[in-house]
Image: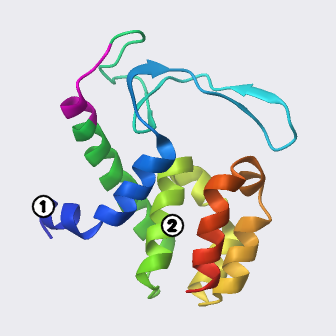
Amino acid sequence: MVFGETNRMYEEVKDKIKKSEGYSATGYFLNYKGADGQDIQEDFMTIGYGHKCVDGDPYEPRIEYSKEVLEQQFEKDFLVYLHAAERYIGDCEVPEVIKDCVIEIAYNIGEPKLFQFVNMRQAMQDGQWKLMAAELKNSKLYRTLTSRYEPMVKLIEEA
């Protein structure tokens, strides 16, 4: 599969990710309320569509970057998390809606945290969508970002 094909195949999930992540042309350090109500400030900068800046990234705080540059970053990030989702899914066959949800979760929390959802993964690999949805719903992630994950839980339940 060539890059352009990957690009076209996943436009819907890309649009959902962009909507959920929001967009910022300048870097910022995210503040939010945790599941237990505590204030959390992330210790890394975020830019574009939720890109987590790491050592080696060219981005600096308080500098505005072009939409073109940040769209290219999104496309690179998307491929990273698409592959992470494919590793998480493994050899089992899943409906596209399940794959899209796993891609979105991977983009949001990263591969290491995704693989901590061991019971959700087992339910997915067993084709037990309601149990998969219940595992996601019974997580700190869901409690912290309910507005983002509630629609996803419903999609998984209905798969």
The numbered disc on residue 90 is none
Label 2 element class: helix
Question: From mark 2 to mark 1, how far is it between C-alphas?
Answer: 21 Å
Name the spot of residue 22 as percent of width and height, x first.
46, 39
Query: Is 65 a magenta residue?
Result: yes
In the displayed structure, 148 sits above or below 9; it is above
Mark 2: amino acid: Val
Name the spot of residue 53 as percent of width and height, x first.
43, 28
> Which residue is found at the position 19% from the left and 33% from the top?
68
Circle 2 is placed at which residue position? 102
> Which residue is found at the position 55% from the left and 86% from the top?
159
Answer with the quarter of the image where residue 8 lies.
Answer: bottom left
Residue 90 visible in the shown view: no
Name the spot of residue 66 as percent of width and height, x first.
23, 24
Name the spot of residue 129 as percent of width and height, x first.
63, 85
Query: Is 2 a magenta residue?
Result: no
Instruction: Please state if 117 lies on the left or on the right of 89 as rendered.
Output: right
Q: Which residues are magenta?
A: 64-70
Label 1 element class: helix
Marks 1 and 2: in contact by CB < 8 Å? no
Residue 7 visible in the shown view: yes
Mark 1: amino acid: Gly
Please name whichever residue, 118 or 53, is drawn nearer the observer in this view of the structure: 53
Circle 1 is placed at which residue position? 4
**Residue count near mark 2 (Cα–Cα under 10 Å), binned few <14, some 14–19, many ≥20:** many
Answer with the quarter of the image where residue 7 lies.
Answer: bottom left
